[in-house]
Image (tube, rainbow, N blue to C red):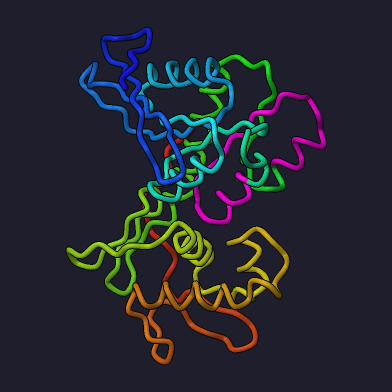
Amino acid sequence: AVTVLSQPSFVSDYTCVSSLGKFRRHTARPYLGGMIITRLLIVHPETTLRKDLAREFTRHRYNVTTTAHGNDALHAALTDPPDLVITALNLPDIDGFELIRQLHDSTAVPIIATAHTQNTTITIRALSTGADDVLTHPFATVELIARSRALLRRVTRDLRHLNHTHGGVTFDFALRHASRTETTLTFTALEWRCLETFASSPKRLFTHHELINRIWGTTNTTTHRDALRTLIRRVRRTLNDPPKAPVFIETHPGVGYRWLSKSPVSSPPPSA
C-alpha cells in the first residue's frame, strides 16, 4: 500500500515487510541535483508524530525508515544498519532502554532517545544504556534535526582521523569500508567497533577489561571474556592475520591485545 504524504512532489511512504512485522520507509526522489544520503531510523509509537518527523527529515534530504515497534527496529538496524536511530523510550513491545542497549551492543549506530518526562534519572539511564543524546517532549522538530546533524558530524569527524592503510589493507572508518587491493573486506558493526578501538591508540596494549568496556560498554569482564576472544578471532580471520605471526593484532597472554599499525595519517578533520 502506498500513502503519499503532504509533499507529493518528492515524498512517498510505502510499507516494507520484515520477518518481525512491518515498518515504513520514506524516500525522496532526486531534487536540487542531489539524493538523500543519510539513512535514519525513527522508532515511535505515535503514528502522527512519527509521520510528521519522517516528513520533516525527508525534506532535509534524509532517507527515513519508521516503525512503532522496537523488535522491528532492531531487525531493521541489524539487517541494514542506518546512520542514525531516533527512538522513543515508551514502545509497545519492548522497553526503549532495552532497544538502546541491544543497538549499542550489536551496532555502532549513534542513537538519540526521546522521553515524555523531564526526569534526570531517565536521562542518565538512557545515556548510560547507550544513547548519545536525549531530548524531552515537547520539542521542536528543528531542534531534533539540528541535534541529529551535530551528532552525525561529530561521529564522522571522530572516525575520519583513524583512516589509514596497514598490512595492505585500507581502512575508512567513517564509511565503514576496508579493502585489500580491489577486494572489499566485510566486518560486522561489533567488529568495526573493535577495529576503531585499536586504531584509536595504535601500538597501545589494551587489557581485556579495557577492550570489553570500550566495545560492549560494560565492566563485566567475566561474561564477555569468551566473547572478546571470539570477536578477535573473527577479525583476524577476515584480515588473514595469523596469531603466531601477526601483522595487525598481537596477543599478550593473560593481559590483552595490541594493534601493530603505525599511527594513522590522514587529512585533518573538517571544522564543525
Q: Nearer the viewer, residue 8 or 185?
A: 8
Look at the image and give the residue range highlighted in magenta.
99-126
Where is residue 130 drawn, in percent x and y?
64, 47
Quarter of the image for residue 248 reads: bottom left
Relative to residue 163, is residue 228 drawn left or right?
A: right
Relative to residue 39, is residue 254 drawn left or right?
A: right
Q: Is residue 171 above or below residue 240?
A: above
Q: Is residue 125 magenta?
A: yes
Number of marks drawn? 0
Residue for point 32% across, 65% down = 165
Residue for point 38% across, 86% down = 242
Q: Is residue 216 magenta?
A: no
Where is residue 171 drawn, in percent x and y?
35, 60
Q: Nearer the viewer, residue 216 or 152?
A: 216
Relative to residue 213, is residue 249 drawn left or right?
A: left
Relative to residue 167, is residue 78 drawn left or right?
A: right
Where is residue 226 drawn, in percent x and y?
59, 78
Q: Is residue 181 above or below residue 130?
A: below
